[in-house]
Image (cartoon, rainbow, N blue to C red):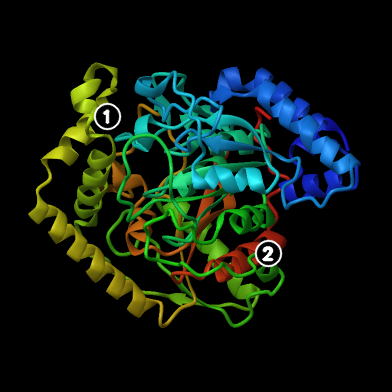
Amino acid sequence: MNDHDLAFAPAWRQAELVRRRDVSPVELVTLYVRRIERLDPTLRAFITVCADQALAMAKEAEAHVLAGRDLPLLHGVPVSVKDLEATRGIRTTLGSRVFRHTVPDSDTVVVERVRRAGAIIIGKTSTPELGVSLAAVTDNALVGTCRNPWNLECTTGGSSGGAAAAVAAGLCALAVATDGGGSIRIPASFCGVVGLKPSQGRVPRAGGLGRAEPNQFSQSGPISNDVRDAALLLQALAGPDPRDPSAELREAPSDFLGALDRGIRGVRCGWSADFGHGAIDPEVEAVAHQAAWVLEELGAIVEEAGIRLALGLAEHFWTIYGANLSAAYGHLLDTQPTELGDDARTLLERGRAITGAQYARSLRVVHELRLQMDETMRRYDLLLTPTTAVTAFPPEQRPRIIGGRQVDAVTGIYPCTFPINMTGQPAMSVPCGMLRGLPVGVQLIGRRGDEATVLRAAAAFERARPWNQWRPPLA
């Protein structure tokens, strides 16, 4: 296997090669560090590359292999971690000048589990400041704008754009990312990779910088080139932790890997182009719709779902998201206001101004939305939508009119992702085609707690329409 093929080999395959002693963890780390050195000055996918620490961890991992020890799921496999997760001994910035010199002395629970799975952290991927962007792109004052490896003039989307760009360009096989409104799925769609947002509460949340954040919407999850890799990382991350205050999904997770080969005959799927409240580019809709018919050819039952979500959901999403962001980082407006960028300052100020009555009204809307979606999911095992309303675009040219309709200035490009954060369901974007040299993703949405069916369908689609041979020009 040459270096290029090894760089794009799925993480599960790399783990097998390490166990068989066909490849060493040191070789893998060295390969990816060299690719990062060559390609990342153009991409700007990483905020911090920890080559020395990764090499030291690789040598330790190699010693465990040679000693014949029992090896965990991802032993010796280099992974990236989005720079919102605190990493012990590795700089953690949250994409902000406020934290540009911060080196935590502890990990978040997610990073603890990444290390426990035997993975080697090769670097911290780029995120907009504090993980939010009014422009729906990944940029920050530390490294600038993250570029899409399929077209360097275009954005990766946000906020896990660095993670998606790194995986798409072969700078790592597997990335740990976060999704609070589409932040895993949007970049996955724009960059032609796999991105899974687990059910709310499936992956515990504890530790990190700032103050404890009430968390109704966000989950950590995988970005990868391969559905099995996504299942593998979810298996490593999932399960309750006593430090997580969430009341949801406290049971041990099921066998996600075991679901991949079961096929989808008889699985009931409802197609919705726009949830009745968004606008989708007709060409994007057509490509994603073709993916739905592929699932039907594989034995699924596919029909129009006829879903119409309430208008104005974006306002309630941002009310809750903004208030929670203020609870976590609002003190920075008082202590370090000049270090904050414009978007972060604007969102924190908006969050601080939200009243209790506004917050309560928005919580009620979320409750009503969940009831509506629960009723819909009594009819379907899965919902299918385009992941995004458009393909990737130049960062300074965010679409304001899509399909002939004016759209929301922020959420207009992702009308089908942020409602799923509000409902707490699992959702996955998988590559389903190309338009003018840019990837298109289809979103698979399951019942709360049922990542297994989402992964089954994604794996079946991957086998029928493999995308692993797709490589962006930069790579």
Q: From the viewer's perspective, is 221 left or right of 424? A: right
Identify the element where label 1 is drawn: helix
Residue 148 seen in this snapshot = no
- Residue 258: x and y in percent read 69, 69
**Residue at the spot x=80%, y=35% of the render?**
25
Question: Which amino acid type corresponds to the residue marked 2 in the rendered image?
Answer: Leu
Name which of mark 1 and mark 2 comes first in the sequence. 2
Identify the element where label 2 is drawn: helix
- Residue 425: x and y in percent read 42, 64
Per the rendering, the mark at residue 257 is 2
Q: Quadrant of the C terminus?
A: top right
Q: Residue 31's image quarter?
A: top right
Query: Which one is nearer the viewer's eye here, 444 or 283?
Result: 444
Per the rendering, the mark at residue 343 is 1
Question: Label 1: how many residues lie within 10 Å, few (<14), some (14-19) or many (20+)?
Answer: some
Q: From the viewer's perspective, is 228 left or right of 351? A: right
